[in-house]
Amino acid sequence: MFRYLKSAFLVGVDVPPLGRLPVNVLGASAFLILGFAEPAFWFLGMAVEAGILTTLAFNPRFQKYVDGQSLQLTQEDAEQKRQSLVNVLDPQARKRLSALSEKCAQVLNVYSTQQTEGYIVESNEQALKTLQWVYLKLLVARHHLETPASHAPEDVLEAKVKELERDLQDPSETDTLRQSKSATVEILKKRLANLRRREQTQEEIESDLTRIENQVDLILENVTIQGKPTTISTDIELASDLLGGSVFGEDESAVSALEHVYVPHKGSAQKETA
């Protein structure tokens, strides 16, 4: 309620020569100044402002207007954060994202020519936004997996492990040196495991990207060929695990902030009938 009262106090009116003027602020200021000459104006001003503010703040139409303004600001902030994620991608990844977005736009364009019911269009528009968001997350995750700090190739690490393991079989090695080399072997094996896990995740991400591309192609084909609107699923089972925020590197906070904007609650997900 405080938000509505604040917006009511700051409400403005467009005056062509002067621009937008905050009428309530100006009115309150006028009563304040007049009150120094005659204190009764202070009480009159408080009564007038109280009446105006409560009338506006409790008006459903005004509340919807305020909510709409807040939502618009949130969407603008979300788009800026989303664009910052797009900007970290390489040109080829941005090209793939753009191609997917164009196909999603084509789907919605077909709906607009079919006199499709509004609730179906709205539901499918949200579903397509979710698909594009998941696709973008996959691209960002792949970007961070492909551009880590310097890593030795897998065959080099394997060769070092084998060399050290051979050294450990040498009975002339001192206990101190043997312990040092044994510890080094364990470290190298952990590096190998991380490297292989990263490569596996990259393969899974590429598989998920291809799956979403084919899913959007199928949606476009169905809506174009069949000429019949169908609900689009937002239930996507990914091969890759994007729940671990570390996969997004320094973009983790931006991804987390955008998640609630582009992904609807699970209970509202529509089952695909195509």
Image: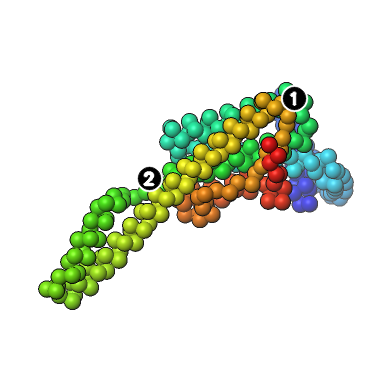
Identify whether 39 is placed above or below 188.
above
Residue occupying the point 64% across, 33% down: 219
Kindly report which numbered mark, 2 or 1, lies closer to the viewer in this rendering.
1
Residue occupying the point 33% across, 58% down: 191
Look at label 2 and name its amino acid.
Answer: Thr
> Left or right: 109 with respect to 55?
left
Q: Quadrant of residue 211?
A: top right
Look at label 1 and name its amino acid.
Answer: Gln
Kindly give the residue lying farthest to the bottom in the view shown: 175
Residue 53 at what x, y percent from top left? 83, 46
Real-space Cα separation, disc 2 to disc 1, in angstroms: 45 Å
Indicate which disc, 2 or 1, sits on the residue closer to the N terminus.
Answer: 1
Is any part of residue 236 visible from this angle? yes
> Any mark on residue 147, and which?
2
Q: Quadrant of the C terminus?
A: top right
> Left or right: 161 with respect to 86?
left
Callout 2: SS:
loop
> Left or right: 72 with respect to 173?
right
Callout 1: SS:
loop
Residue 77 at what x, y percent from top left? 60, 41
Residue occupying the point 37% across, 53% down: 196
The tally of labels here is: 2
Classify 10 Å Cα crowding around label 2: few (below 14), some (14-19), many (20 and above).
few
Q: Nearer the viewer, residue 109 or 7?
A: 109
> Any mark on residue 114, and which?
1
Residue 222 at what x, y percent from top left? 66, 30
Q: Nearer the viewer, residue 223 or 84?
A: 223
